[in-house]
């Protein structure tokens, strides 16, 4: 058993380290549990028994061995799980291939049905009447346009000072004769 001054003097003589650094080293040894410290009155007493160090090392060894066994058990469990998952994946890969094949077949059937639906919708009576109505509106607009062109040609023919014929007026404005 030594007090701090005795430890500083003995250690500095044997190692050649300054006493301030020895205090730091001693504090670290106490913190690590390799040296014991007790306050006795006004001074601190430091000691270390070889049996205490050996006992701590054995306890740490036993604790580490238990931890090693626990980790090995965990590793074995994960390896078993991994083997099971790999086996399941192989089965699922075959199942997945089958599902992908079915998806491809169903997609082709779907595209055929969509094209049939489109052709059926083209012949839908509602759409046919809608198309007929649209065609009739367009036809009426064309007839009105032709009438307007004829009126214009007649107006120009009646009021032209040059005495052009209707066929010459049509030719000049590039209006076909059969309009």
Image (tube, rainbow, N blue to C red):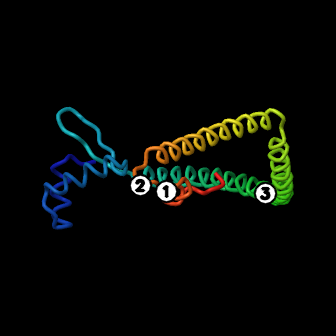
Mark positioned earlier in the residue sequence (1 or 2) = 2
Q: CA distance from mark 3 to mark 2?
A: 95 Å
What kind of element bears circle 3? helix
Q: Which residue is painted at 57% across and 52% down in the image?
A: 62
Q: Which numbered circle lies on residue 173? A: 1
What kind of element bears circle 2? loop
Mark positioned earlier in the residue sequence (3 or 2) = 3
Q: x and y percent of residue 76 in the render?
A: 72, 56
- Depth check: give the residue in front, 116 or 91: 116
Q: Is residue 40 above or below residue 9?
A: above
Q: Is residue 96 above or below residue 133?
A: below
Q: CA distance from mark 1 to mark 2?
A: 15 Å
- Depth check: give the residue in front, 110 or 98: 110
In the displayed structure image, the side of residue 38 where residue 76 appears, left or right: right
Q: x and y percent of residue 10 in the render?
A: 19, 59
Q: Is residue 171 above or below residue 137?
A: below
Q: Which numbered circle lies on residue 130? A: none
Residue behind mark 2: 162
Q: Dots 1 and 2: beta carbons under 8 Å?
A: no
Q: Nearer the viewer, mark 3 or mark 2?
A: 2
Neighbours of disc 3 within 10 Å: few (<14), some (14-19), many (20+): few
Q: Which residue is painted at 67% across and 36% down in the image?
A: 137
Q: Nearer the viewer, mark 1 or mark 2?
A: 2
Residue behind mark 3: 89
């Amino acid at each position: 058993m030594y007090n701090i001054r005795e430890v500083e003097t003995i250690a500095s003589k044997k190692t050649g380290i300054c006493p301030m650094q020895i205090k730091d080293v001693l504090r670290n040894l106490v913190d690590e549990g390799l040296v014991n410290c007790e306050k006795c009155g006004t001074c601190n007493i430091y000691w270390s028994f070889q049996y205490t160090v050996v006992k701590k090392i054995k306890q740490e060894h036993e604790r580490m061995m238990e931890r090693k066994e626990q980790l090995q058990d965990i590793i074995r469990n994960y390896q078993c799980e991994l083997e099971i998952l790999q086996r399941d994946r192989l089965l699922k890969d075959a199942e997945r291939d089958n599902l992908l094949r079915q998806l491809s077949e169903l997609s082709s059937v779907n595209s055929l049905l969509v094209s049939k639906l489109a052709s059926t919708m083209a012949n839908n009576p509602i759409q046919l009447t809608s198309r007929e109505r649209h065609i009739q509106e367009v036809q009426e607009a064309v007839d009105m346009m032709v009438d307007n062109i004829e009126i214009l040609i007649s107006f120009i023919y009646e009021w032209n000072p040059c005495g052009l014929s209707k066929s010459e007026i049509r030719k000049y404005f590039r209006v076909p004769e059969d309009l």
